[in-house]
């Protein structure tokens, strides 16, 4: 069984990574979160949706199929952006030096 890795968007919204695909929260109820494929070009089966528990660590319904390949190259970019943003909040250095 593949693991769910939690990520956050630049705006701090929760996302998950599963088998190379990135999912964003579409809606949340009192019992579950509904996520959909981050790629808006994914037109297969209602844009590859899945359901997780509220802590987003267990699937309640497995993800449906995708119409594109996994997006493994996007994960390091997302993590780098989050690291830059976190450093900018706590650092006293100018933004330009953080980016370099």
Image (cartoon, rainbow, N blue to C red):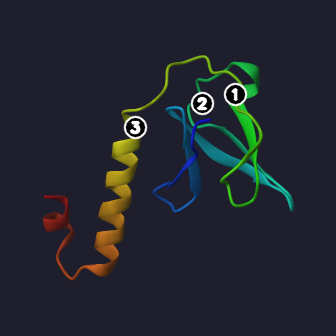
> Which image quadrant for residue 83?
bottom left
Is mark 2 in CB contact (under 8 Å) with mark 1?
A: yes
Q: Quick one: quadrant of the N terminus?
A: top right
Label ID, residue 100: none
Residue 14, relative to residue 4: is it above or below?
below
Residue 23 locus on image (x, y percent) = 60, 41
What is the tally of numbered marks visible in this picture?
3
x then y, percent, for residue 31: 86, 58
Q: Is residue 21 above or below residue 56?
A: above
Front residue of this view, candidates 18 and 13:
18
Residue at left 31%, top 53%? 80
On the rendered structure, is 79 left or right of 27?
Answer: left
Q: Residue furthest front?
A: 1
Nearer to me, 86 or 63: 63
Looking at the image, which residue is at 34% across and 44% down? Answer: 76
Local crowd size for mark 2, using a 10 Å CA cut-off: few (<14), some (14–19), many (≥20): few
Q: Secondary structure at mark 3?
A: helix
- Name which of mark 2 and mark 1 comes first in the sequence: 2
Crowd around label 1: few <14 · some 14–19 · many ≥20 (10 Å): many
Q: Which mark is residue 47?
A: 1
Q: Residue under circle 2? A: 40
- Find the distance from the CA under tag 3 to the CA under tag 1: 18 Å
Q: Is label 2 or label 1 in front?
A: 1
Give the residue displayed 13% in from the left and 66% down from the top.
97
Q: CA distance from mark 2 to mark 1?
A: 7 Å
List x then y, in percent, for residue 12: 52, 62
- Residue 51, quarter of picture: top right
- Above or below, comparing residue 97 to residue 61 in the picture: below
Disc 3/disc 2 C-alpha distance (Å): 14 Å
**Which residue is under mark 3?**
74
Asked if the residue under mark 2 is in contact with the one under mark 3, i.e. CB atoms within 8 Å, the reply is no
Q: Nearer the viewer, mark 3 or mark 2?
A: 3
């Amino acid at each position: 069984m593949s693991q769910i890795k939690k990520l956050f968007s630049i705006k701090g919204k929760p996302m998950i990574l599963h088998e190379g695909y990135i999912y964003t929260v579409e809606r949340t109820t009192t019992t579950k979160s509904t996520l959909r494929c981050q790629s808006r070009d994914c037109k297969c089966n209602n844009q590859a949706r899945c359901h997780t528990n509220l802590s987003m660590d267990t699937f309640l319904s497995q993800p449906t199929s995708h119409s594109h390949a996994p997006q493994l190259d996007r994960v390091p970019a997302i993590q780098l952006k989050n690291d830059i943003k976190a450093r900018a909040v706590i650092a006293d250095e100018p933004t330009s030096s953080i980016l370099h």
